[in-house]
Image: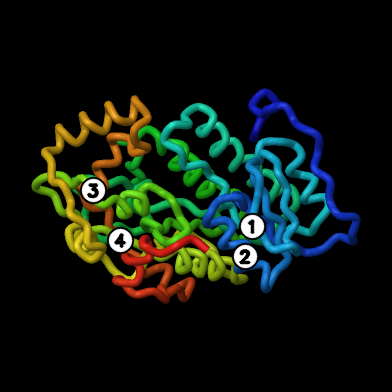
Amino acid sequence: MVTEQDKPSDPPRPSFPSRPRRDVVLVSGGAGRLGRLVVQTLHREREVVAVDRRPIHGLPKDVTHVRTDLRWRAIEDIFRRYNVEAILHLGLIHNPRAEDDQYRFNVLGTQHLLDLAAKHRVPKLVMLSSANIYGPHPDNSLFLTEDAPLLGAENFPNIRDLVAADRIVQSFFYRQPDVETVMLRPVHIVGPRVKNAPANYLRLERPWTVMGFDPMLQLIHEEDAVHALLQALRPGVRGVFNVVGPGEAPLSRILSTLGRRPIPLPAPLVRGTLERAFRLRMTNFPAPEIRHIQYNCVVDGSLARRVLGFEPQYGLIETIRSVLGHEE
């Protein structure tokens, strides 16, 4: 449970339209690029309330957006005002420079949202996690299944909060069997709109690579990731699912497809250079992320295909080249 001392001071509570109680889907992280894409797609079929502590821009006019922190009491006003029939929890911070506040926001915010889901008997909860929490490692077998150990924080402490949030939701799954809980662990999401570490790396004209390493990578198009989230909202679906794109390819092939001319460097030089550049704020890539261009972290997506009926709509070349597109 989230204790009172863990919660930041509440701001004035948000105001809501004076309307009868209606069925809605609550989407946390609505200000993010993927969150906005989810809301823009979902609102065509369901009424949506988008939540984020950041300003939310570019949403359809019929979408209610609430600027609040998931840890604040004000979030419960949404549950009182509306009949929340499903929660899409996309509101985890992925910022390598935000440490203590990021951990508290992701872990305590997730726990508070789960407490409200149980209290208000929300029928469905879907959380977007990440396949990165398995961790790239030289001992990894190909095609890790959903029961593989979550070792991502072992060499990259900055994602310990993502591992913790994932485990909190897994525990919720067993403690609250009346809530259909779904956890999606997608591979690297890329596309014209997203600006995460994998997409930003592939946009570099001369990306660094590590001499002697050419790992297999898996990418999924941003719109395929949205499709998987919507599939997870279907009644009767519950469980933990790896979500993969149209296949896997070695890093060298991906860079060649994009016309990149990589700069191969020895691993110690890459790590040392990144550590200094990160401290000087010359890059947003922390040094531990070089493990993603050294070692495999390839997951098995067969369970999502079988249970969710998920199949990517974008081919491998389309997915790779989507990072070259323009944001809409």
Q: Earlier in the sequence, mark 4 or mark 3?
A: 3
Tag 1: Cα neighbours inside 10 Å, few (<14), some, or many (≥20)? few
Q: Earlier in the sequence, mark 3 or mark 2?
A: 2
Left or right of 204? Residue 26 is: right
**Do the CB atoms of the residues marked 2 and 1 lie less than 8 Å apart?**
yes
Q: Position of residue 170 (x, y in %)?
A: 50, 49
Tag 2: Cα neighbours inside 10 Å, few (<14), some, or many (≥20)? some
Residue visible at 46% across and 38% down?
95
Question: For the residue marked with disc 3, what is the amino acid?
Answer: Pro
Instruction: Give how far apart the Cα atoms at labels 3 and 1 are.
Output: 32 Å
Q: Position of residue 160 (x, y in %)?
A: 42, 36
Q: Secondary structure at mark 2?
A: helix
Specify how the rendered protein is coloured. rainbow
Question: For the residue marked with disc 2, what is the amino acid?
Answer: Gln
The residue that mark 1 highlights is: 58
Residue visible at 43% across and 56% down?
185
The residue that mark 4 highlights is: 218
Instruction: Give how far apart the Cα atoms at labels 4 and 2 are.
Output: 26 Å
